[in-house]
Amino acid sequence: MLMTGRLTIASVFRVYRPTDICDIGLLCDLIWSDPSSACSMFDPSPRGVSSVFGKQAVNNFCTKMHVDLICRAHQCVMDG
């Protein structure tokens, strides 16, 4: 869903909770997609689930959603 560009904030709020995370779909992409400096938009993830996304994909998303910041809360940056 992230790769298609059809994601909306409303689609995130429509997710029934609690729920299981499948191997494909919106929740999978929101939870398991990773940033990558090796691509500009989207590529398949080397982990075999979801995708990796690049800087242009982030810029496009921020513009479309009218946001200035995306926070990733499950990774730490060493010396960050």
Image (tube, helix red, strand yellow):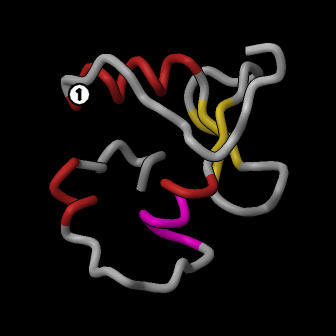
Residue 5 left/right relative to 66: right
Write the residue at 73% across / 33% down.
76
Residue 26 left/right relative to 37: left
Decide: is 35 above or below 60.
Answer: below
Q: Is residue 9 magenta?
A: no
Determine which residue is flagged by label 1: 64
Front residue (pair 79, 28): 79
| Quadrant location of the C terminus in the rendered image | top right
Write the residue at 74% across / 49% down.
45
Coordinates of residue 62 in the picture (x, y in percent): 32, 24
Badge 1 marks a residue whose secondary structure is helix
Write the residue at 79% across / 61% down.
48
Front residue (pair 74, 12): 74
Write the residue at 55% across / 18% down.
55
What residue span does the magenta drawing correspond to? Answer: 24-29
Give the amino acid at mark 1.
Answer: Lys
Q: Residues within 10 Å of mark 1 (few under 14, many from 20)?
A: few
Decide: is 79 above or below 29.
Answer: above
Q: Main secondary structure of the magenta part?
A: helix
Decide: is 62 above or below 5.
Answer: above
